[in-house]
Image: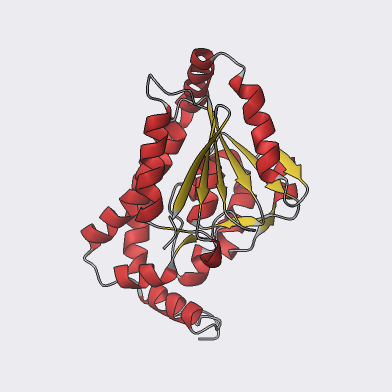
Amino acid sequence: MSEAVLFKTQGSTLIITINEPERRNVLSRSVYEPVEKALSDAVAPESTVRAVVITGAGQFFSAGGDLRMLRQRREMPLPDREEQIEFLHSMIRTVRACPLPVIAAVEGGAAGAGASLAFACDMIVASEGAKFTLAYVNAGLVPDGGGSGFLSMNLPRQLASEMCLTGQPVLAERLYTMGVVNRVVAPGDALSAALDLTEALSRGPRQAQASIKSLIAAPEREAFNAHLLHERRLMSIALGSDEAQEGIRAFEEKRKPVFPDSHGS
């Protein structure tokens, strides 16, 4: 059985690769905890790592959470559901709090919590045509991983609403014009372009970079952490709803969901 996450140091850059390409690099505790540990080790006094790249194996960054796992969580008591979501949120906070520059190299696209992970990084390099999707609503759920918080803080309300309420993907090129994606490169070049960025960053002053990251994050840090708690609560409640039951079942049966009280139901 292959490792869910791979770690490689290239020069002074730590490359973190989510490694389940056959499942579009779904996220789970087998990813969250190793990533947190790797980031902790990267900032240890003896570490020579100066920057981090997070990417996905194969042609897709990450599809986010596994709906089959979410179906199992529906049977848990509400506090246990919240506890499970907290594992994801702990990783997101660790990525955002890392004093080293963290770059997301996105091939193909990022969906759900996978998009939230990309948004948690300091910069995003994406391939042409890469799609960013928060389609929780199609399963009767709400975003987690800080995705809705990031969008509401960094995009016009109308675009954030479009992404979260319709679940339709938004291309990297459109997010580039909004300043959310930093570079759009040819398919297959996201990782190499991200490494070009980290190579330049690695030559900079480490302490000053860490201070700059702290300054940039400071205005929204408290609000974002509070938002994570709000997302965790609402996602946990949504998981137990009739809408989620229908949405997850429809996904598994490969059909369009018919939600209670919706038009045409």
From the viewer's perspective, tell me whether residue 47 is left or right of residue 185: left
Q: Is residue 124 above or below residue 232?
A: above
Q: Outermost residue toward the right?
A: 186
Q: Position of residue 185 (x, y in %)?
A: 76, 44
Q: Is residue 12 above or below residue 167?
A: above
Q: Is residue 140 above or below residue 265?
A: above
Q: Position of residue 129 (x, y in %)?
A: 74, 55
From the viewer's perspective, tell me whether residue 78 is left or right of residue 229: left
**Residue 224's image quarter?**
top left
Q: Position of residue 195 (x, y in %)?
A: 65, 34
**162 and 194: which is toward the camera:** 194
Q: Is residue 230 visible?
A: no
Q: Is residue 165 visible?
A: yes
**Residue 44's image quarter?**
top left
From the viewer's perspective, tell me whether residue 67 is left or right of residue 51: left
Q: What's the colour scheme?
A: secondary structure
Residue at 65% in and 43% down = 191
Q: Quadrant of the N terminus?
A: bottom left
Count of marks, rendered view: 0
Residue at 35% in and 43% down = 90
**80 and 33: which is toward the camera:** 33
Q: Outermost residue toward the front?
A: 1
Q: Is residue 205 above or below residue 142?
A: above
Q: Position of residue 133 (x, y in %)?
A: 59, 58
**Residue 240's image quarter?**
bottom left
Residue at 59% in and 50% down = 160
From the viewer's perspective, tell me whether residue 39 is left or right of residue 201: left
